[in-house]
Structure formats: C-alpha cells, structure tokens
Amino acid sequence: KKRLMIIGAGGVGNVAVRKSARMEDVYEEILLASRTKAKCDAIAKEAGPVPVRTACIDADDVDALERLIKEFKADIVLNVALPYQDLTIMEACLRCGVHYVDTANYEPKDEAHFEYSWQWAYNEKFEKAGLTALLGSGFDPGVTNVFTAYAAKHYFDEMHYLDIVDCNAGDHGKSFATNFNPEINIREITQPGRYYEEGTWKRTQPLEIHQNVDYPRIGSKESYLLFHEELESLVKHFPTLKRARFWMTFSQQYITFLRVLEEVGMTSIEPINYQGMEIQPLQFLKALLPEPSSLGPNYQGQTSIGCQIRGVKDGKERTLFIFNNCSHQMAYQDAKAQAVSYTTGVPAALGTSLVARGIWKKGGVWNMEQFDPDPFLAELGPLGLPWEVVVDGKLAFGR
Ligand code: NDP
C-alpha cells in the first residue's frame, strides 16, 4: 500500500481527501497539508477509513516541502493548492523521488498567463528519475482530455473538430460568487479568448464570441469562448485537429457583476498602494467573496461538461458527444462539496490512484490524454461521475 500526500485544503482538496480516504486497497495513510492547518483538520475529522494526518505547509518553500515529504515518507503527492505552487512542488517531488499529480498548469503570480512550457520543461528530469508527473487531472483539464483520447481510440480514424462545452446550470442563491478559487477563476475569464484553427491560435477580446449551446438534460445556454489550458496539449497530441475551442456558460448577472468589478479596477493584479500598504485588488476581492467550498449546502441544479467531436471513421463523417452531468446536491451528499469542486476532486483522486497503483506509470511529465483512457473511464462512473457517449445522434454507451 502507498502513502499519499495531498497539498491544499480548499474545495477540491476536500473532495480529493474524502475520495482517496475511501481507497483502502491503495493507501495505508494520507497526509493533508496546507497553509491553514485548521482547514485540514476539519476535513480529516470526517474522512476515512484510511487514516488522514494533517500538517501546515508553505508550498512556495521547496526546502519545507522536501522535509515534510521525507518525514511522512510519501510515495506520491497530489497538488490541489494553487497553480502558483506547481513548480516548487514538482521540484520537491524530484528531490524526494516521489510521483507528482496536479489539476491546473503553472501560472506566475505576477502575470495572468498560463501554459504548459514551464512544466513540460521538467520532462527530462522526471524521466531520468523514473518518476511520473501527471498534469491536469481535474475535469477540464482532466476528464475532457481523457474523453478526447477515448474518442480517438475507439471511435475515429481522424478527429477534425473539437468543442469542449462546460455548463454550470446550478444556483447557489448568492448574487456573485465563483465556483473555484476566485482569484484563479477571474484571472482566467478576464483574459483575451483564444482558440486553435488550421495550425494557428486565433485571439479574441475577453468573452467576445458567444453562442447558444444545447446541454443534455439542461437545455440551451449562452456559452462564451475562452482559452482553456487543455486545448494546448490536445492540439499537440492530436495533430489531425483542424480546430479546437472551449466554451463555458455564464449568466447575464455574473457577467454584469464581473464587468462592473473590472471597470472599477477590482479584478486587477497590479498592486496598488493603499494607506501605505501594497494590496493587489483581485486578492482583496477574493477576501470579500464567499469561499467556493461554502456554496455546497444550498446549491441546486447540475453541471454538464463534455466534448463534441467531428471527424471520420472508415471514410465516413462521424459526430460524437461524450459528457458527464453532475448534480450539486449529489456532490454535497457524497463529499460535502458543490459540483465544481466535486468534478475536479474526483478525477484528481482517480488519476492519483492510477499512478499510485502503477496502472498509469511511466517516467516523465505527461498530460492525461497520453495514457490509456480505458482504465480511467472504467472507474470514473463508479467513483461518482458517470458518463455517456452519443454517436451520430444516438446514445452509444452510457453508464
Ligand atoms: P481553493 O482556493 O479553495 O483552495 C486552495 C488551497 O490551497 C487552500 O486551502 C489554500 O490555503 C491552499 N494554498 C494556497 N497557497 C498555498 C501555499 N503557498 N502553501 C500551502 N497551501 C496553499 O481552490 P480550489 O480548491 O477551488 O482549487 C484548487 C486547485 O484546483 C487550483 O489549482 C485550481 O486552479 C484547480 N482547479 C482545477 C479544475 C479542473 O477542472 N482542472 C477546476 C477547478 C479548480 P488557505 O486555505 O490557507 O487559503
């Protein structure tokens, strides 16, 4: 059995710990470490049967990470802190000879800019050490990458068009709140949009392109084109793709709030001087907004995330839609979380356990689509995220 260290006790960490602690065949002990130990203790108290220890850690400090990983004798580390900590945690894993898993690609604190180059640069080091680094094991990135790999493996000779569609049709009863870390979320959606077409990246103004998308069991919802990190790795690993785009729903109310906050400067990451103190407006805003993990109890409705793919099989055009719908209430009953944390924490726990069990294991830095999608998808439904495949308009497979 293995020893798992999870870093980050937020919305996603809560789900990842609860799910991992039910994997008695895989783990003998779990250590949950984060900046605020009280949050780790509150989660650990309710998780089991695998014993969960807790600790305080500053994940920006490689030496402190190295000490804690060694002291706990971890075999694998799951990073569900913030994207800013990816490189320090990867560095510490290399020093200690342990595997690494995360759910979001590295982003420098002072630059709202995310791409895989920084983490891919670690490939040789992980390969030489015979250690697996699995990147982006959440839902999107994560399950969407595996969905695409599954479609490529079983349904297409060539995939040409990919649209990842992400809908949250839930209602948490608050006038404005983000579903995951507000700082990371707002940085992501106030950026210019970007999509891939015919070998180049096309840029758009933030939220400039939008259209109605039909979501299963939800209906039609206005969806906005955003850049999302899985597009970068998917077009690299599936070079037959002529176009790849990502769409996400936002309500009119959400966009109005966001525009006002933007116009008055509250979403800026440029520090300002306030009464002799340096503050970053976006970080200050985060302190005022509800904690994403607190939205769970009253959250109604569901999320729906999937991949619409067009391509050819045996010389014929084929369309495929592969998706999961997840209810906020079910997520709360299973893991005291809302569906956005749940749909990220479940695949994080699953990807980590596949690496821990040696089912997904090879030295180097990998994106999810580079592994065999079948073992992952065989366990995703039973773990709480059932998925369905519709081929040429007909349900081909559902569980
Ligand atoms: P939260 O803000 O709820 O949680 C982040 C946690 O990390 C908090 O407990 C925080 O501590 C801790 N933390 C932050 N900085 C440090 C540090 N320097 N040292 C130690 N701990 C630290 O975020 P979420 O749980 O919503 O998101 C977690 C990750 O999941 C993010 O990287 C996010 O981008 C990613 N994500 C991925 C998705 C996907 O589908 N792939 C979807 C949603 C999120 P404290 O409690 O003290 O603030």
Image: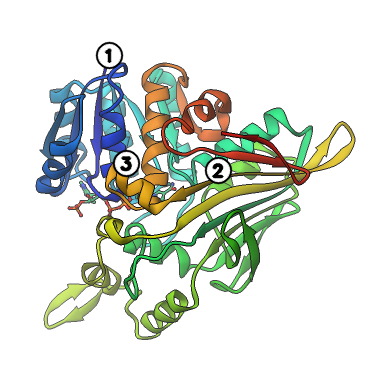
CA distance separating discs 2 and 1: 29 Å
**Residue 40, image quadrant:** top left
Q: Considering the image in quadrants, where does the N terminus appear?
A: top left
Q: Which residue is mark 3?
A: 334
Q: Which residue is mark 2?
A: 144
Indicate whether 284 appears above or below 292: below
Indicate whether 239 appears above or below 4: below
Image x and y of residue 131, in percent:
39, 22
Q: Residue, x 21% and y 68% (percent of image)?
A: 287
Q: Which residue is mark 1?
A: 1
**Tag 1: residue type?**
Lys
CA distance separating discs 2 and 3: 22 Å
- Front label number (3 vs 1): 3
**Tag 2: residue type?**
Thr
Q: Secondary structure at mark 3?
A: helix
Q: Residue, x 46% and y 70% (percent of image)?
A: 190
